[in-house]
Amino acid sequence: MNIKEASEKTGVSAAAIRYYEKESLIPAIDRTPVGNRDIDDRIIRRIRFVTQMRAAGMSIENLRRYIELFDAQEDNTKEQKALLKEQLAVMEEKRDDLQAAIDHLNYKLNHFYDHMEATEAELRQLEKQHAEKIAKQTPEDDDEF
Amino acid sequence: MNIKEASEKTGVSAAAIRYYEKESLIPAIDRTPVGNRDIDDRIIRRIRFVTQMRAAGMSIENLRRYIELFDAQEDNTKEQKALLKEQLAVMEEKRDDLQAAIDHLNYKLNHFYDHMEATEAELRQLEKQHAEKIAKQTPEDDDEF
DNA sequence: ATAGACCTTGATGTGTACTTCAAGGCAAGA
DNA sequence: TCTTGCCTTGAAGTACACATCAAGGTCTAT
């Protein structure tokens, strides 16, 4: 398949696919006799993997280091292990940051719903909810953030 | 507290704090008589909130839209709710992508350990581990990605 | 054989989110 | 008073991750 089809299949622009190849995020792509890229499903899978990791916030640089480990034939076991662990730590920290932010937003959303329902139900339960709101407020942090 | 102390307290550079103020991610900061910023705990909390959301991958633009809703006096409850939910979904997807990659890496790391120990233990358990390796391979996707 | 639709590479441009620089002001200590 | 250390603003510079452009090649159809 040519680069345009690959682009349509993955949702990644042709320019980005070329860029990923240049940056070694995907392996060197086979060429047709005239030099055009001939992209197979293995490449498609790798493009999708890259897309996923990029969406999750991993940098090109970290992603390349990560991928190099998988592509390496020799076992530089000690270095590889160290790199893998390092990368794992980066990713876990990122995930934890995300989780913290998710928790924050979820708290906010629940807090919020009370207020909305009060409005939508035309204040029928206003007093009860007012009490709930006060109960929910964190003691030190009276502020909205 | 001055901007340097605020920077040290939050881990955000003084320049970035000024930038956030300019971009309305944090409210206008009070000034001393000579015009220096005088930063209180409310600002510190907002800086931390911004840091958390930025770490979670929210753009400055989206963050400002989100914050504007809170700073507005009218109830934009519907829009606020929609924005919160939208952002939450984005973040949860990112987290899940990251978790998948973490699982992948962890699997690799374990796999790896086996191999290392084999080498270090001078291949004593080679046959057993070879069998394990084969058992571990995923059926449809023989590729590493 | 000429247009149209693909492709190539290398160079340059762009948006985001800051960082760094330049030029200067204020306050305290030697 | 002069150095040190903080601050201010506006402008310009930087890194990342592409996007876009320029100049040209190939293939197919009319």
Image (cartoon, coloured by chain):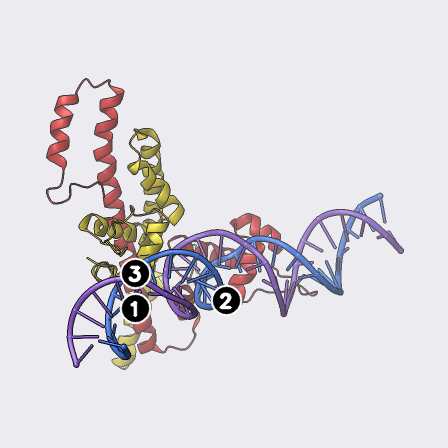
Chain colours: A red, B yellow, C purple, D blue
Gap between marks 3 and 2 measured at Cα:
34 Å
Name the residue that disc number 2 marks.
A23
State the SS at label 2. Answer: loop
Residue at 11% over, 45% down: A140
Q: Choose between A34 and A13: the one closer to the eye.
A: A13
Residue B14's spot in the image, x, y percent? 30, 60
Judged left or right of residue B21, residue C14 is: right
Gap between marks 1 and 3 measured at Cα:
29 Å
The answer to whether A111 is drawn above or below residue C22 in the figure is: above
Q: How many marks?
A: 3
Q: Choose between A101 and B38: the one closer to the eye.
A: B38
Q: Are both tags, 1 and 3, on one chain?
A: no
* Mark 1: amino acid: Glu
Q: Quadrant of residue A139?
A: top left
Instruction: Write down the chain letter for disc 3.
Output: B
State the SS at label 1. Answer: helix
Judged left or right of residue A111, residue B19 is: right
Which quadrant is the C terminus of chain A positioned in?
Answer: top left
Which quadrant is the N terminus of chain A positioned in?
Answer: bottom right
Name the residue that disc number 1 marks.
A86
Would residue A133 be visible to someone looking at this image?
A: yes
Instruction: Write down the chain letter for disc 1.
Output: A
Q: Are marks 3 and 2 in contact (CB under 8 Å)?
A: no
Q: Residues within 10 Å of mark 2 (few under 14, many from 20)?
A: some
Name the residue that disc number 3 marks.
B14
The answer to whether A13 is drawn above or below residue C25 in the figure is: above
State the SS at label 3. Answer: helix
Q: Select label 1 or label 3 by which is in front.
A: 3
Residue B123's spot in the image, x, y percent? 29, 79
Q: Choose between A42 and A103: the one closer to the eye.
A: A103
